[in-house]
Image (tube, rainbow, N blue to C red):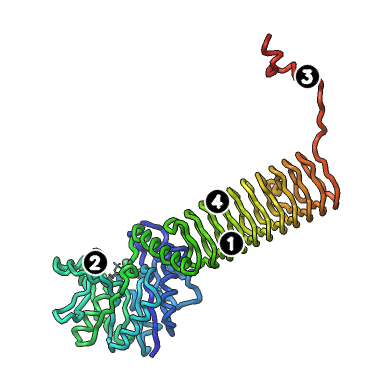
Amino acid sequence: MSNYAIILAAGKGTRMKSDLPKVLHKVSGISMLEHVFRSVSALNPAQTVTIVGHQSEMVEEVLAGQTNFALQKEQLGTGHAVRMAEEVLGNLEGQTLVIAGDTPLITGESLKSLVDFHINHKNVATILTAEADNPFGYGRVVRNADGEVLKIVEQKDASDFEQQIKEINTGTYVFDNRRLFEALKEITTDNAQGEYYLTDVIGIFRQAGEKVGAYMLRNFEESLGVNDRYALSIAENVMRNRINKGHMLNGVTFQNPATTSIDIDVEIAGDVELEGQVTLRGKTKLETGVYVSAGSYLQDSHIGANSRITHSMIEESTIGQNVTVGPYAHIRPDSSLADEVHVGNFVEVKGSCLGAGTKAGHLTYIGNSEVGQNVNFGAGTITVNYDGQSKYGTTIGDGVFIGSNSTLVAPLTIGDHALLAAGSTITSDVPEDGLALGRSRQVNKDGYAVRFPHHPARKEN
Ligand code: UD1
Ligand code: CA
């Protein structure tokens, strides 16, 4: 029998106090909804339906092409939301997982165990539950003296006795697909919140004498439902620990994992070492032997083997092997540094390629430039790539030596092995092997300094 899945993602998430729909808030770099979708994918569902409503277009965008969507125009409750999937799933034979889009920590493994449990026990409905130290806010699982599940009661509807129950509903269930949609026709809004509760179908099945069960998560952590930003920060923390532990077990050294934040899709090879206060975002990939020091922020970048990144920011760029970057360097989008490049303190590179062995040690801006191999940028070199309206490119050949404090006014081509004298303003192309002097000649006037107030000869008078 086939598996189907329904993801609930229509709510606004009032308690988030945000303009962004709740399920689009991110945990470790991707939205909560994507986390849930990835876990659900472990079941290989024949069909998935994501229920959207509040800011539906934004929500649909993150899963476009990967799921069916059903629109819940008014958010009348989780039971009403599931009903919206009837058109797609209504008559199908099989079991349907229902999961809330705000539970990003539930793993695919747990979902598989839940479905197996459901099938093995021949249940009509199985609730994924967890044992909470502080169950406040969650629906509680009410059982009879024999331990059989009777119903779920929401926090706001729970009696004093029911509020003592520690077994909570994670908001994830497996149902017999046909029976689910039949039972949904019977639910009412007769409760404290005046909503159609999905949770009421459990009591309905019980009363019809059908088999209902609960599968308890081994790890309570997974059950977290994110309703506010405090819970979001807890989710981030749990996910960070999970991701970091995975990398550690793959051979990555973390000097201070509590402060090292790595997005879920980052790839790290063995024998990489990360200091604390390191942030790796997006699809960043680090090859073996890379060392990243505290204060570094790398986004969507590829760092080649044995390169060393010190207290620097690198965005959407490609770094070769044995490269050293920083401290305090900024590699901006669309840059590439070939092997053995050195970019030192207060150097900014933007939209530029630097050939192998090229060095820019200090205080330099390289923008929209194609730079050859073994070029030496003196301190204070600036490519002048912008005239206030358009950007212009600079091409620098192999082995060029640029004296300190040179200004290269683009568009410009500097031939191989040319030498630019320190302090030059270069406005025209320089041929291969040429020397360019773009500065005024120095004049010395003998004895003139005596005329100025700084001079001891003046001060004595
Ligand atoms: C729900 C459960 C509760 C459980 C908790 C687990 C109900 C009635 N209660 O409560 O038993 O312990 O989850 O986290 O189901 N949504 C819609 N349309 C709606 C209402 C909600 O799509 O009309 C979506 C939300 O976007 C969210 C999910 O359903 O992703 C859960 O809704 P939420 O309001 O957070 O439910 P809880 O009060 O947390
Ligand atoms: Ca919730």
Could you tell me how far apart the alpha carbons at marks 2 and 4 are, in whole angstroms?
Answer: 51 Å
Type of amino acid under label 3: Tyr
The residue labelled by disc 3 is: 448
Q: Residue furthest top?
A: 461
Locate residue 318 relative to residue 86 in the image: left or right.
right
Camera-side residue of 345 and 158: 345
- Looking at the picture, does residue 138 appear above or below residue 178? above
Residue flagged by tag 1: what amino acid is it?
Ser
Front residue of 9/443: it is 443
Specify few, some or many for label 3: CA neighbours under 10 Å numbering under 14, 14-19, or 20 or more: few
| Between discs 1 and 3, the one toward the N terminus | 1
Question: Secondary structure beneath disc 1?
Answer: loop
Give me the disc on residue 193.
2
Question: Which numbered disc flags the more N-terminal residue, 1 or 4?
Answer: 1
Q: Is the distance from the Cβ of mark 1 to the nearest ligand 1 atom less than 8 Å?
A: no
Residue where numbered disc 4 is placed: 311
Give the residue type at disc 4: His
Quarter of the rendering containing residue 51: bottom left
Given residues 281 and 245, the one toward you in this image is 245
Q: Which residue is mark 1?
A: 301
> Quick check: is the Cβ at mark 2 less than 8 Å away from ligand 1?
yes
Q: Earlier in the sequence, mark 2 or mark 3?
A: 2
Label 4 sits on a secondary structure element that is: loop
Q: Three-letter amino acid code at disc 2?
A: Gln
